[in-house]
Image (spheres, grey):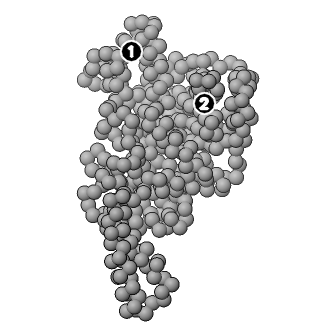
Amino acid sequence: MSFTIPAFLIKDEYIQTPVVYKFSRENKIKRQSSVNEAIREIEKFADKSEENRDKVISWINKVVEEGSKEICYERVFGCEELISNPNAIDEKIHTKYPDCPFSSVATYKNNGNVTLIYYKIHKDENSIPVRISFVFSQLLLCEESREKGFGEKRPYPVIVEVYLKQGFVISRQKSKSTLYKYSENPSLMSEDKINTIKFAKERIDEIIVMLGLEKLYDKGQIRHNVYKMIYNMYKEYTFTPQSIIDQVNANRSEADAFVKDIFDKLDLQRINEEKAVKDILIFFEKFLSINGNNENQFMDDRQAFVIQVSSDYEEETTRIETNSSKERPLQSTEAFFDSKKSIENSKVCKKMRMNYKRTNPKYFSQNPLIVEFGFNKVGYIKTMSYAEEEDIQNVLQDLFKNYP
């Protein structure tokens, strides 16, 4: 029987143009003028041998984990016990999911129940478990724009990973607002609508309970931790370039003299003089930063740069401005400095968007990797365009490093 790539992977854009051409090139499959033709060639490639078929299935599994993703996460405690007793992990999983078919997203025949179709315990070179990955899948109904009120059967995979050393449980899934609970009746009811973040959180909580891990239940504290994490990343990626620091410092004497002169003329209290000097130095920094045609100094020496942020006290955002294939750093705009003081005072950020450098930009040079961080029932990260595994790992490492 000839191999066919499941239609939903193309309809829901799990498989996107750059990864199709990348796979074709890596496997010496003749490049086609259209993506549909390229996909047909990949299917023909799979039919040539069992080895090729396995290679295509592995590729499909990979692109389902990558791509434009909504990533939810929970901080957990108690992983040390699992690390020290790896046999207990397998025992717990097998007890909870005795009928796991160890199937692929490409070949599993979905039904209306959430099913664990695959899991793997990843170990380091010393055979110590470091990560556990789970693949859940379920048949849902997806509303198509051309047929409002009616749903088409659509598999919906969710990947959940437990990062044992870092103490996080993380999900990856497609963000879709047109999904509904599965029913044989294609008519859609509003009460059956699926919230993908809530859906993923249920899978995360299921894994936490199954593995006997602990987590925070105080929603206010969790929200605060997420906002603090975003602020920590904001601080990390909006540091002032050394060239601007040098210019500001070189003009410190002018700031001191100006403030002293104004305070003398207006007979102001000297207690506020140092604050005034600080404001003048920020004034210098601001206009050196927004002087125009200098965005590269806020991009070249960092893995990512901020393009949009909102503080906890007041919404301070800027429009994302496109300059060829790049996004303008917020730090080179007036809006950054208008919001800086409120963010520094609150020491939290509610939401932030960043432009990450891609690890392998060859096939994605025209698609900036915009990543959004925020909170909605749970901490979330959204990749706004296709993200390869290396890029996702870069983002996750920032999460692990900056979470309080």
Q: Where's residue 85, x and y in %?
A: 73, 27
Residue 112 visible in the shown view = no
Relative height, residue 134 to residue 70 (above, below):
above
Label 2: which secondary element: strand
Q: Is residue 101 left or right of residue 59?
A: right
Q: Nearer the viewer, residue 260 or 27?
A: 260
Residue depicted at 48% across the width and 89% down the height:
269
Relative height, residue 209 to residue 25 (above, below):
below
Q: Amino acid at mark 2?
A: Arg
Q: Amino acid at mark 1?
A: Glu
Residue depicted at 64% across the width and 40% down the height:
167
Q: In 3D space, how far apart are the residues under numbered discs 2 and 1 (Cα atoms)? A: 32 Å
**Quadrant that contains the N terminus:** top left
Query: Badge 2 is on which residue?
Result: 131
In the image, which disc is placed on residue 43?
1
Residue 325 quadrant: top left
Residue depicted at 72% across the width and 38% down the height:
78
Query: Of label 2 and label 1, which has the lower sequence position?
Result: 1
| Mark 2 or mark 1, whichever is nearer to me | 2
Residue 264 quadrant: bottom left
Q: Is residue 249 left or right of residue 31?
A: right
Q: Where's residue 72, x and y in %?
A: 57, 42
Q: Where's residue 297, x and y in %?
A: 32, 54
Q: Is residue 103 left or right of residue 148?
A: right
Relative height, residue 298 to residue 16 (above, below):
below
Q: Nearer the viewer, residue 296 or 10?
A: 296
Packing grade of label 2 (10 A; few <14, some 14-19, many >=20) is many
Label 1: which secondary element: helix
